[in-house]
Amino acid sequence: MRIAILSRSSKLYSTRRMVEAVEARGHRADVLDVLDFAISLEEEYPDLYYRGEPLDDYDAVIPRIGASVTYFGTAVVRQFEQMDVFSANSALGIMNSRDKLRCLQILSRYNVGIPASEFVRRKEDVLPAIERVGGAPVIIKLLEGTQGVGVILADNEKIAQAIIETLQSTKHNVLIQKFVAESKGRDVRAFVVGDRVVAAMRRVAQGQEFRSNVHRGGRAEAITLDERYEATAVRAAQIVGLRVAGVDMLESQDGPQIMEVNSSPGLEGIEGATRIDVAGAIAAYVEDQVHFPEMDIRQRLTVSRGYGVAELPIGEASELLGKTIATSGLRDRDVLVLTLNRDGRVIANPRGDRDLRVGDRILCFGRLEVLKSFLPKRKPRRLRRLKSPPPAP
């Protein structure tokens, strides 16, 4: 098997470890600089050139795309995907995770823990936004920051307002987040590969530093996650669209609070702290997926006109409630049930005698006009009110 590792340098620890892990499993590993590719677009023949030469055939790629080359790097990964080469992380997943605002927007739709966050542009909106996250102290983050750079703790609202306005005046995009006091100076990183956490560590800041990043002198220690934190990490990675991810969480009194989902997590800190062969786990996962690749169901199944994929919730008013999949009449109406989601557990290809209960969600493929008839009416959006009304314009 030939596996390409997309990295700017073969000397980086994570890149070297991936080469070692792939070769240890009897495969060939090539480190390819993502900026040395040329993307060739032709009908039915998406192709890539590397340093001016047609690219050799590869069975899989492992992207290690740095923040500075996100746009071109994800374009290369996307081209590999169009050429039916398995990628350890999809281009869409990398893009979703790289933008902190986009990542939180995606996660906010689901019942996973995230700190209250606000993104504003108008000067008049800054103080109300701080109030909505619970007031000072607050965390201020540059959306483009990495490794703890651009993360500021503001102790009071006036200081926070001044920092935000200064950063915005220099054309920086700023995120305002609730400060989780009980987790000050420490966080948890869970390393997700596929559908499990293969290693986890707690990072603890040193001295007066509140940022726990190892790159800022933080101390890392191996931990065993409880089921709630592990399930949150796996679910967050899947929601964002990543197969390999570092999920950073705060330990709040309400449970895990997701700070970030990283698509190119470093291996040095986690392997050093846990003594676990994380690179080997990634290589083994890629090996398995080459033989049994995941598919984008919506892309593959929605090419037929009038057909599509939809997730149908089973509520108290649903005509499917209390029926089994076999007696629901869905199959007679040209609808196929692909999965049943119950209590956070996904049951693939559910049996016909499975009864449908309140809270279930079934992923179906079929005629769009039929699927539409089972979708509930949209609920009106819940409005939040400020403690005091905004001033009149």
Image (cartoon, rainbow, N blue to C red):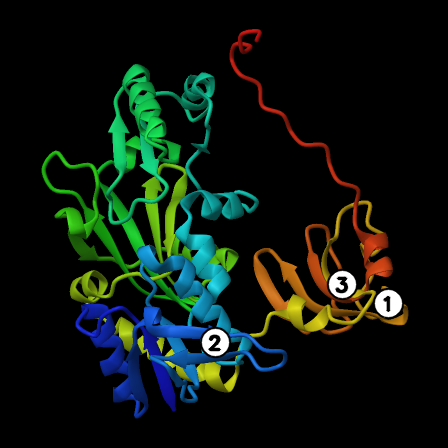
- Per the image, label 1 sits on a secondary structure element best described as loop
> Which quadrant would the C terminus be assigned to in this image?
top right
The residue where tag 3 is placed is 355
Residue located at (82% from left, 45% from top) = 317
Q: Secondary structure at mark 2?
A: helix
- Total residue callouts: 3
Q: Is residue 144 left or right of residue 108?
A: left
Residue 198 pos. (x, y %): 33, 68
- Mark linked to residue 80: 2
Q: Amino acid at mark 1?
A: Thr
Asked if residue 54 lies left or right of residue 185, the reply is right
Residue 237 visible at all: no
| Residue sticking out furthest to the top | 392
Measured from the top left, where is residue 178 in percent x and y?
A: 37, 31
Which SS class for mark 3?
Answer: loop
Query: Disc 2 vs disc 3: Cβ atoms closer than 8 Å?
Result: no
Q: Residue at x 30, y 54 (%)?
A: 189
Q: Which residue is mark 1?
A: 327
Q: Residues within 10 Å of mark 3 (few under 14, many from 20)?
A: some
Q: Quadrant of residue 156?
A: top left
In three-dimensional space, the C-alpha distance between marks 3 and 1, rounded to whole angstroms, equals 9 Å
Q: Are the two marked residues, 1 and 2, in contact with CB atoms closer than 8 angstroms?
A: no
Q: Where 284 sits versus 218, above or below?
A: below
From the viewer's perspective, is 34 left or right of 113? left
Q: Amino acid at mark 3?
A: Asp
Q: Residue 199, position in %: x, y?
A: 29, 64
Inter-mark Cα distance, 1 to 2: 43 Å
